[in-house]
Image (cartoon, rainbow, N blue to C red):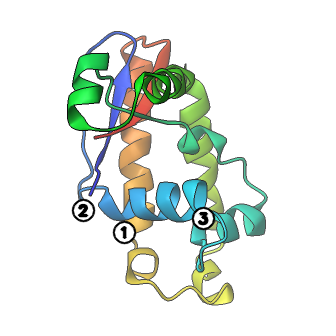
Amino acid sequence: MFTLHLETDTNQHCPFWFTKTDSKSFCSYVFFEHLWQAGNDPDVIGMLREYFDLDVEPILKVASEDLSLDDWLAEGYGDEVEWRKQMETNQAAWQPSQELLRCVQSFLQALDGDPDVFSKLGISEPYFVKGYFRQDLVDLLRMAEWAQNTDAKRVRLVLG
């Protein structure tokens, strides 16, 4: 299973990580259930996005590890055409650090403003109910703040 980390255009290593989780559940709910396999039940991120009328695009911009064509082919991920498409996706995942920061802040403000949202929406998954999702957002916010404070112009979330 994949974990998530933050890259910056300054190539500095982010000193922050997910404090309560290893980000696998975050990746599962945000990327696999919401972004790539839309229509899954439950799509908790989709439910929260609609309920709060949030723009969650900045947390949906995600790259995979940048691989050379030779490594891509050796790993059996596909052919050169698929590699080129993935590298374009990776480039498109770059965004201003402020966009990610605002998105995560808005999500946290919405959750904090409606602490009963999960019960209202019938969400019972422990990841959400026990506060792990919220903590992952807090940790992601810390990463985005760090990036902005290091003068990174662009950041991207990377699954690896």
Q: Secondary structure at mark 3?
A: helix
Q: Residue at 40%, 56% (x, y): give it.
A: 27
Q: Farthest residue toward the front?
A: 79
Q: Earlier in the sequence, mark 3 or mark 1?
A: 3
- The answer, for residue 107, to whether it is visible in the render is yes
Q: Secondary structure at mark 1?
A: helix
Q: Earlier in the sequence, mark 3 or mark 2?
A: 2
Q: Residue at 42%, 25% (x, y): give it.
A: 83
Q: Is residue 3 above or below residue 97?
A: below
Horizontal side of 83 relative to 66 (left or right) equals right
Please, what is the three-letter code of the amino acid marked with disc 1? Tyr
Question: What's the distance in space between the residues labelled 3 and 2, CA to CA?
Answer: 19 Å
Q: For mark 2, what is the residue?
A: 20
Please, what is the three-letter code of the amino acid marked with disc 2? Lys
Horizontal side of 32 relative to 1 (left or right) equals right
Q: Secondary structure at mark 2?
A: loop
Q: Residue at 31%, 30% (x, y): give it.
A: 65
